[in-house]
Image (tube, rainbow, N blue to C red):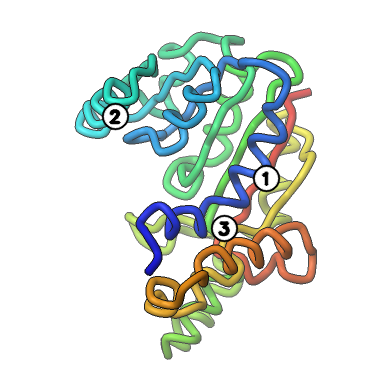
Amino acid sequence: MATREQRGSVRTAVVWDALEAALAGGPRDVVDLGGGTGGFAVRLAESGHRVRVVDPSPDALAALARRAKEADLDVVGLQGDVTDLVDVVGAGSADVVLCHGVLEVVDPSLALARIGEVLRPQGLLSLVVGQRHAAVLARAMAGHFQQALGLLDDQSAVDGRTGRRFTAGELEALLAPAGFVPTAIHGVRVFADLVPAALVDIEPGAAAALVELERAVADRAEYLPLATQLHLLATRG
C-alpha cells in the first residue's frame, strides 16, 4: 500500500527533480512565495539553502514554524503577499523565488513584476501553475461538458478558490514583459490525476512505477497538454 509520502512524491517528483538540478552548486537565498506550511521550504533548508517563506496566513506560518523546529531547521516565516513582497523581503535579496500555486489567484502581471524586483540579476524563478488544457479534459471526463466547453479559451478565473488556469503560451507571454527568460518547462501530474487513487494506494509498487512514468514524459512536448500543472523555470535578465 502506498504511503502518504509516496502519494506526495507522485505529485511533486518532477518539480523536485528540476529544482534540485537547478540549485546544485551551493546554498542559495530562497524566497517561497505562498509557501504555506513549508512543504518545499523545509526540504530546501535541509539541503542547506537559506529559506524565507512569505504567506498571508498566520496559521500556515505557525505550522511552518512548528515543522521547522521539529526538523531543527532555520526557516524564516514572513506574513505578506504579492502586493507587499518587496517591502517584506527586500529588493534584490533572493537568488531563487518559488511561486507554486499562487499565480492562479493573484494578478499574474503584478506578481511577476514584484518577483522580478526581489530577484538578483540572473536569479531563478520556479513557477508552478494549473494548466487549462488538463482542466478542460477533467471536466469532460466528469461529464461536465458545458463547463469544459466554456473553459476552452477562457482566461478568467474558474472561481474564487480555484482561480485561473494557464496554457504554456500564455505563461511565456506573461514572463517576457516582466524581464524573464524561460529556460525549461515540464508537465506535472500528466497521468497522476487520471489514474484511480485506489490503484496507486493498494497495488504494490504502483506509486514508484507511476513516478517513473511521470519523469519519463515530463519534458516530452506531446504530453504537455495532458499535465494538470506546468512547471516553468525562468531567469531574470
Sequence-wise, the earlier of marks 1 and 2 is: 2
Is residue 76 shown to the viewer in this render?
yes
Query: Split into 4 quadrants, where in the image is the C terminus?
Result: top right
Residue situated in front as seen by the camera: 206 or 213 = 206
Query: What residue sits 42% from the left and 26% below the top?
Result: 83
- Per the model, the C-alpha gap separating discs 3 and 2 is 26 Å
Observer-side mark, 1 or 2, equals 2
Residue neighbourhood size for the residue with mark 3, other residues' Cα within 10 Å, grouped as few (<14), some (14–19), many (≥20) = many
Residue ID for mark 2: 67
Disc 1 residue type (three-letter): Leu
**Place of residue 224 in the rendered image (x, y in percent of width and height, measured from the top left):** 70, 65
Residue ID for mark 1: 232
**Label 1's element?**
strand
Residue ID for mark 3: 229
Is residue 73 shown above or below 205?
A: above
Is residue 131 shown to the viewer in this render?
no
Is residue 38 shown above or below 154?
A: above
**Left or right of 237 on screen, residue 103:** left
Is residue 195 shown above or below 23?
A: below
Disc 3 residue type (three-letter): Gln
